[in-house]
Amino acid sequence: MSVNPLLFGWPGDARPDGSVVGIDAFQFMSIVTKANPILLWSAVWTPLTYDQRTISLRTLSTALPTIALDIGSTFPEGDDWIPIEGGASFQVVPAPAVIVALAGAMLTGTRRRR
C-alpha cells in the first residue's frame, strides 16, 4: 500500500478481515500538484490461494475530507466535499495449469504411426 509520491501521509493499516483503515493523504501548500483527478492511494493485492471466487471491494469513508482550495486569496479557502463511495468486484479464475501440462505431455508422448 502506498500514498501517491506527490503527496504526504500514511497508507493505512491492513486488518485481518481484509479492510484497510487510517488512510491519510495530503499536500502542503508549498508543494502542490494541480492534477485533476489525483491518485491519492494505491495497493497491490496478492491472494493466499487462487481458488475460484468473487472478490468484492468497496470504499467507506468514516470522516469527511478536509479540503482547502487555493483561489488566489491570502489564505486557502475551506470547502466541504462529500466523498463518493464506490464498489466493484472481480472473479479469481485459476489457470488450468495441470490441464495444459498434461495436454503438452500427451502431444510430445504420442508417436506417429506409419
Image (spheres, grey):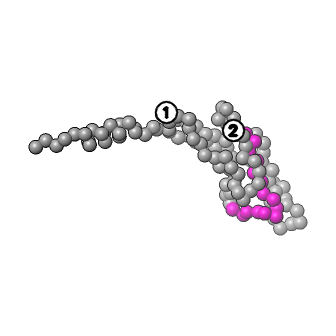
Q: Assign the magenta stretch its main secondary structure.
A: loop
Report the front residue among 47 and 112.
112
Residue annotated with mark 1: 51
Q: Is residue 69 above or below residue 23?
A: below
Q: Position of residue 52 (x, y in %)?
A: 48, 34
Q: Is residue 108 above or below residue 27?
A: above
Q: Residue at x 68, y 49 (%)?
A: 2
**Of the image marks 2 and 1, the number of the one nearer the N terminus:** 2
Quarter occupied by residue 111 = top left
Left or right of residue 87, residue 34 in this image = right
Mark 2 and mark 1: span between their CA atoms? 22 Å
Please give the label number shown on residue 71.
none
Number of dots carrying numbers: 2
Q: Position of residue 48 (x, y in %)?
A: 56, 35
- Badge 1: residue crowd in 10 Å (few <14, some 14–19, many ≥20): few
Q: Position of residue 33 (x, y in %)?
A: 73, 63
User: Can residue 22 be seen from the camera position used here?
Assistant: yes
Q: Which residues are magenta?
A: 20-35
Q: Amino acid at mark 2?
A: Ala
Q: Amino acid at mark 1?
A: Asp
Q: Residue at x 53, y 40 (%)?
A: 90
